[in-house]
Amino acid sequence: MKDARLRFVSLAIGLIALAIASLGAKAQEASDSFLSDLHNFRISNYMALDAYYRFSGTGDTDTLNEIVVGINTANDAMNSVSQSTADVLSGEQIEALNQEFDRFKSLMRDNINDVRNRGYPDLRLVSDMANQALTMNNMATELYTAARESSETDTSPRVEAARMAAVKMAQMMAKYSVRSNSAVTQTFQGSDTETSLDEQAREFDELLATVQQGPAQGELKSLLEDIGSKWQFIRGSYINYNEKNVGFVIDRYSKGILNSLATTIDLLQNPAS
């Protein structure tokens, strides 16, 4: 009888431990997903801004579609953040970010309509949108840090550096588009308080160096080499802007770096996959 009771108690303890472990794994997974959504939110908005600056000079439909894709992707990420079960941020914090996003979308809509209806941008509205993008991104970054600390999510320094490098690259792309687009470059150089392009490029240097530290084999090794070679090809254009640089080449290589960084993050988070 005692043996049966001991076996029952042992089984019950085992089941409880298994349930706790399962809940912990689900909580960790929810936190990881939450951080990933916040990260994607930041990237997508800057990609939309980059596309707008190019659109303002050409009115091209394909470029307009890029804006739509960027905004829709950011919208999906924001919805995922709002519906998350991670419980690492308050409803008020998430709603505040959502309101900043609504302001950005409204300004984007107004700026697109200006180009479509008048054929050229209203520089005051463009400036308002750039400043709003920076305000929104700063808030998203603060919430990302708060969420990471609140959830005690254990992300590696290389993953964090890769995410920060991706955001930095997206910011640089948008700022470069301002300078290389004749429709806005004469009197508008981006948001009022954003770091200069050459400083951002040097910050990207440091972040990339952190990502490249540590073991890398197979696909990860190839990706890091690809990122490094692409960056060396366009780095000088970001450090020393020259009007003779071919903007679409810088844009293509920068997007290639962003795509490779996204895959790098996946591999670093799931090394066995």
Image (cartoon, grey):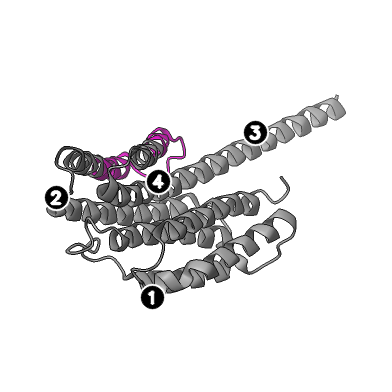
Q: CA distance from mark 3 to mark 2?
A: 58 Å
Q: Which residue is mark 4?
A: 44
- In the structure shown, which secondary structural element does the residue marked by tag 3 occupy? helix
Mark whose residue sits in front, 4 or 3: 4
Mark whose residue sits in front, 4 or 1: 1
- In the structure shown, which secondary structural element does the residue marked by tag 2 occupy? loop
For the residues bearing labels 2 and 4, Cβ distance under 8 angstroms: no
* Residue type highlighted by circle 1: Asn
* Residue type highlighted by circle 4: Ser
Q: CA distance from mark 1 to mark 3?
A: 57 Å
Instruction: Assess disc 4: are there few (<14), some (14-19) or many (≥20) residues with their C-alpha within 10 Å of its C-alpha.
Output: many
* Residue type highlighted by circle 3: Ala
Disc ID at residue 240: 1
Q: Which residue is mark 2?
A: 122
Instruction: Assess disc 1: are there few (<14), some (14-19) or many (≥20) residues with their C-alpha within 10 Å of its C-alpha.
Output: few
Residue 179 picture location, percent across and down: 29, 63
- Ranked by sequence position, the earlier of labels 2 and 4 is 4
Asked if residue 214 is positioned above or below residue 30 in the image, the reply reads below
Q: CA distance from mark 4 to mark 3?
A: 37 Å
Q: Which residues are magenta?
A: 75-101
Mark whose residue sits in front, 2 or 4: 2
